[in-house]
C-alpha cells in the first residue's frame, strides 16, 4: 500500500531512487553466459535481472509448422516464481503470453528469417528478478543472444521504458514508479535503422508528452545501444580471425 | 568509394561498411545503396566485394563440400540424410536396385559430397561417391570451427593425424570420424578437437594442440620427469 505522503519525485528533480529524470539505472551486460545454448546474454538494469538464450536454427517440431520459405521464430518470456515479491505461480500467465508475442514480433523485424527456410529459432527470456522494465531488458538481452548465436540481423535492438510520474516524464521506470505513476511506455528501437520495433502505452499521455517521451527514450536507447556494442566488442576482444 | 572498416576488423550487426551497394558480399546486406554487416564477424574484401566472416554461425552447404551424414530414412528412390543441427540432405537414386545395392540402413553414417543446394534443399552425390562408415568414433564439432581444425592447407589436421596415429575423416558439417590404433590415441584426438573448439580464435594453437596430444600419449610427461631427475 502506498503511504499517503510518499513523493516519487522530489522538488529538486530527484527520483525516489536518487536518479535524475533522464537517467538510466546502472546497466550491466554479459554475453555468452550459458554454455548449452547457441547464444546467450545477461542484462542487469538496476534490480531487474534477465537472462536470454537462443537455440537454433534447428528442425521444427511438429514438422507441419515449418514454413517453406523462412524460419519460424519462437519466443518465450517467462518470469521465475521468485522474481517478484509475492511468489508467481508456475506456468505462463496472460501477461507473459502477450509479452512473448510482442518480443517475438520486435525480433522478427530485424532477423533475416528467410536465410533459414524450414527451421525454427527459439528465444527464451527468463526474468530472474523483476523491478520494472523486464520486457525492455528482456528484448535487449534477446537481441544480444541472437547476435552471439551468429544469426543474421539487420541491427541490434535496444529498449527502454518512459513514463509519466506526478506529471514528470521519466526515463527507465523502476517498479514503484511504474505502479504508482500515471503512464508507462516501453519502447524498443533498432537505432541504426532508426525504426521503432515495439511501442506500448499503459496509461494516458498527451500528444506533446508522447513526442517528448519518444525523444527521451531515444536518448536512453542510444546509451544502451553503445553499451551493447561495447559488451559485444569486449566478448570478442581477444579473438583474431581464423587463418585458413 | 569509401570503406568504413579496416581489413579484418571486428564488426557488429548493422554496422555500416560501404557506400557502394554493388559491393555487398557474403555476410552483408544492402539498405538504401549502403552495405551493412549481418553478423558479428571480421570484415574483409574478397574479389572486390565487402564480406563479413562470421565468428559463429550455422553451416552453409556449398557444392563440392565433403560431409558426414547419418541416414534417417530409406526411400525407394534414395535416402534422407541428417547433416546435424537443422540440416537434412537428400540422395536421389533413380534405380531401385542401386538403392538396395548400397545396403544402407537407418542410423548408419556415410561420407559423401554435396552435389547441389537450392530451394528444394540439399542434395548429395549419388553412386560410388558415397562411402559407408562402418567403424570408428563419431565426434560432433561446431561447423564454424571446422576450418580451424583443418588449418592452413591441412596443417592442423595432418599434425593431429601424425601425432595420434589416428585416421580422421572431417565433414564440413561438423561431424568427424576418428579411427585409431587404441582408445588412448582416439581420446587424444578427441581432446585435441575439443581444445580447438574452445580456443579456435587464439594464436599459437597448433603448438598447444601438439603438446596436449603428447601429454596424453605419455611421451611429454615422461620428458618432464627425466628433465626433473637430471636436474636433481
Image: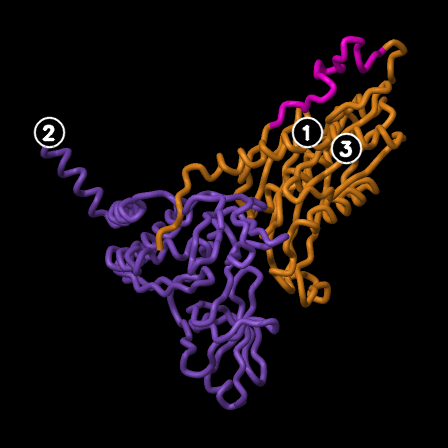
Instruction: Name which quarter of the figure residue A100 lies in.
Output: top right
Q: Is residue A13 magenta?
A: yes
Q: Position of residue A6 (x, y in %)?
A: 84, 11
The residue at 47%/54% (across/down) is B142
**Residue at image coords 48%, 47%:** B3
Q: In the rendering, at what x and y percent does residue B225 appear? A: 17, 38
Q: What residue is pinned by disc 1?
A: A220
Disc 1 to disc 2: CB gap under 8 Å:
no
Residue A138, given in percent of the width and then of the height, sits at 68, 37
First in sequence: mark 3 vs mark 1: 3
- State which mark lies toward you, 2 or 3: 3
Please name the color used to draw chain B.
Answer: purple
* Chain hosting mark 3: A
Structural distance between the alpha carbons of marks 3 and 1: 10 Å
Element carrying mark 1: helix
How was this image coloured? by chain
- Taken as a whole, is the magenta stretch helix, strand or loop? loop
In the image, residue B183 sits, relative to residue B75, either above or below, namely: above
Q: Which residue matches tag 2?
A: B232
Amino acid at each position: 500500500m502506498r503511504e499517503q505522503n510518499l513523493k516519487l519525485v522530489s522538488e529538486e528533480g530527484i527520483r525516489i531512487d536518487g536518479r535524475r529524470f533522464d537517467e538510466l539505472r546502472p546497466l550491466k551486460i554479459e554475453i555468452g553466459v550459458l554454455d548449452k545454448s547457441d547464444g546467450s546474454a545477461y542484462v542487469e538494469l538496476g534490480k531487474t535481472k534477465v537472462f536470454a538464450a537462443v537455440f537454433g536454427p534447428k528442425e521444427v517440431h511438429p514438422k507441419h509448422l515449418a514454413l517453406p520459405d523462412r524460419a519460424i521464430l519462437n519466443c518465450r518470456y517467462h518470469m521465475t516464481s521468485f522474481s517478484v515479491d509475492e511468489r508467481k505461480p508456475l506456468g505462463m500467465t496472460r501477461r507473459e503470453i502477450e509479452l512473448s508475442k510482442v518480443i517475438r514480433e520486435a525480433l522478427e523485424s530485424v532477423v533475416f528469417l528467410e536465410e533459414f527456410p524450414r527451421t525454427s529459432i527459439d528465444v527464451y527470456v527468463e526474468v530472474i528478478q523483476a523491478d520494472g522494465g523486464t520486457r525492455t531488458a528482456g528484448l535487449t538481452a534477446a537481441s544480444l543472444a541472437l547476435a552471439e548465436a551468429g544469426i543474421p540481423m539487420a541491427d541490434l535492438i535496444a529498449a527502454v521504458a518512459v513514463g509519466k510520474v506526478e506529471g514528470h516524464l521519466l526515463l527507465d521506470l523502476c517498479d514503484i514508479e511504474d505502479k504508482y505513476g500515471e503512464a508507462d511506455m516501453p519502447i524498443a528501437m533498432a537505432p541504426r535503422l532508426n525504426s521503432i520495433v515495439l511501442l506500448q502505452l499503459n496509461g494516458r499521455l498527451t500528444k506533446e508528452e508522447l513526442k517528448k517521451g519518444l525523444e527521451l527514450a531515444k536518448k536512453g536507447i542510444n546509451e544502451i545501444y553503445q553499451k551493447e556494442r561495447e559488451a559485444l566488442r569486449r566478448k570478442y576482444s581477444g579473438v583474431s580471425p581464423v587463418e585458413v | 568509394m569509401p570503406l568504413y572498416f579496416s581489413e579484418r576488423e571486428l564488426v557488429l550487426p548493422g554496422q555500416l561498411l560501404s557506400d557502394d551497394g554493388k559491393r555487398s558480399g557474403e555476410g552483408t546486406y544492402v539498405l538504401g545503396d549502403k552495405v551493412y554487416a549481418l553478423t558479428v564477424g571480421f570484415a574483409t574484401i574478397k574479389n572486390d566485394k565487402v564480406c563479413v566472416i562470421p565468428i559463429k554461425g550455422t553451416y552453409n552447404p556449398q557444392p563440392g563440400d565433403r560431409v558426414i551424414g547419418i541416414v534417417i530414412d530409406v526411400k525407394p528412390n534414395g535416402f534422407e540424410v541428417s547433416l546435424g543441427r537443422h540440416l537434412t540432405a537428400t540422395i536421389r537414386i533413380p534405380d531401385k536396385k542401386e538403392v538396395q545395392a548400397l545396403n544402407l540402413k537407418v542410423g548408419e553414417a556415410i561420407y559423401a559430397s554435396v552435389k547441389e543446394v537450392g530451394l528444394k534443399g540439399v542434395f548429395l552425390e549419388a553412386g560410388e561417391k558415397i562411402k559407408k562408415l562402418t567403424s570408428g568414433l563419431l565426434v560432433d564439432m561446431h561447423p564454424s570451427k571446422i576450418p580451424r581444425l583443418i588449418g592452413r592447407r591441412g596443417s592442423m589436421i595432418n599434425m593431429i593425424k601424425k601425432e595420434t596415429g589416428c585416421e580422421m575423416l572431417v565433414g564440413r558439417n561438423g561431424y568427424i570420424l576418428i579411427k585409431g590404433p587404441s582408445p588412448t590415441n582416439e581420446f587424444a584426438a578427441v581432446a585435441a578437437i575439443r581444445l580447438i573448439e574452445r580456443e579456435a580464435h587464439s594464436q599459437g594453437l597448433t603448438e598447444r594442440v601438439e603438446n596436449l596430444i603428447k601429454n596424453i600419449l605419455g611421451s611429454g610427461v615422461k620428458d618432464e620427469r627425466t628433465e626433473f631427475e637430471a636436474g636433481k
